[in-house]
Structure formats: structure tokens, C-alpha cells
């Protein structure tokens, strides 16, 4: 009984210990919407894409259920890094502005970016949407 209790309490801690915050080099690449492990997205679910270059230029492709698509870009000068948190400002004149705030983890076998997409109009926040991205397959 004691051995079983030990296993139940400490094995999950060992698994968690292997996961590390993703590095700057680790975020470079092509990413797509992550719907959740074991989750089958609905037929009308749209996949967004995030492309991060080695020099931190970012392209974010948002696909909407009505068929519209919007692509916004940010250069390294529009990205603020605070420790392991990335704050990306996608600014467009006379349109909705976006801020993507994210971080991520890497356990060697899987990587995931998680965060929030904040929507602004006339410099006023009006919505926030949770997002997560896995490497594109």
C-alpha cells in the first residue's frame, strides 16, 4: 500500500519536472491552433496559424467561420519579451489592433504555446480570447 501511495504521489511530479519553459529558439517555426489533447475539433472549427522567424518576426493568420481571413504581421520592434512572456503588438491603422501575449513549454516530445489574444478598438480593450498553438504538422 505504501509503495502504491508513493507512486501515485511522486510519479506525476517527475513527469512535470521534465517540462521546461520554451526557449527563444524553441518558439521559432510554424504553429497552428491546438484544440486540446484528445479533442476532435468540430467540422466548422477554423485553424489559425502563427509563424515565428528566428529573428522574431511574427505573422499571425486568423481564419473566421464566415470564410474571412486576416493576416497581421509584427517585426521584432513590436515584440516585448519579459522573462519568458512574449507580448506582440499587431497594429493596423483604422482597424482593430491586436496584442498576443503568450509563453510556452517544451518537454522534448511536445511543445505548446499558450496565451491570450487581446482585441482593441480605438485603443480600448473590448475582448480577450484564450489561444494555444502546437507545432504545425
Image (spheres, helix red, strand yellow):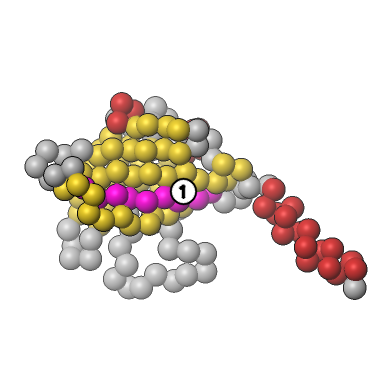
Instruction: State yes or no: residue 72 in magenta.
Output: no
Q: Residues within 10 Å of mark 1 (few under 14, many from 20)?
A: many
Q: Quadrant of residue 47?
A: bottom left
125 horizontally vs 129: left or right: left
For disc 1, the marked residue is: 113
Quarter of the rendering containing residue 77: top left
**Residue 30 location (% of width, % of height):** 40, 44
Residue furthest to the left:
94
State which quarter of the image contains the N terminus.
bottom right
Toward the front, the furthest residue is: 124
Decide if residue 96 is on the left or right side of residue 11. Answer: left
- Residue at the (41%, 38%) spot, across then down: 86
Q: Residue at x 61, y 43 (%)?
A: 20
Magenta span: predominant SS is strand
User: For residue 112: magenta?
Assistant: yes
Please name whichever residue, 6 or 106, is drawn nearer the observer in this view of the structure: 6
Q: Position of residue 124 (x, y in %)?
A: 19, 47
Residue located at (22% from left, 54% from top): 126
Place of residue 96 in the rendered image (x, y in percent of width and height, measured from the top left): 17, 47
Q: Which residues are magenta?
A: 111-120
Q: Is residue 99 left or right of residue 132?
A: left
Query: Nearest the camera: 7 or 72?
Result: 7
* Vertical placement of residue 44 versus 72, above or below: below
Residue 136 appears anywhere in the view: no
* Percent x, y of residue 90: 25, 39
Amino acid at each position: 500500500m505504501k509503495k502504491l501511495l508513493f507512486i501515485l504521489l511522486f510519479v506525476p511530479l517527475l513527469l512535470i519536472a521534465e517540462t521546461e519553459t520554451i526557449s527563444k529558439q524553441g518558439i521559432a517555426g510554424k504553429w497552428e491552433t491546438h484544440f486540446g489533447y484528445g479533442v476532435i475539433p468540430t467540422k466548422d472549427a477554423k485553424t489559425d496559424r502563427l509563424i515565428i522567424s528566428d529573428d522574431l518576426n511574427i505573422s499571425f493568420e486568423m481564419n473566421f467561420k464566415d470564410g474571412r481571413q486576416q493576416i497581421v504581421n509584427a517585426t521584432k520592434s513590436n515584440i516585448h519579451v519579459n522573462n519568458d512572456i512574449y507580448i506582440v503588438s499587431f497594429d493596423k491603422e483604422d482597424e482593430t489592433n491586436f496584442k498576443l501575449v503568450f509563453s510556452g513549454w517544451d518537454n522534448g516530445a511536445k511543445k505548446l504555446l499558450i496565451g491570450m489574444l487581446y482585441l482593441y478598438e480605438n485603443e480600448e480593450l473590448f475582448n480577450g480570447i484564450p489561444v494555444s498553438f502546437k507545432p504545425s504538422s
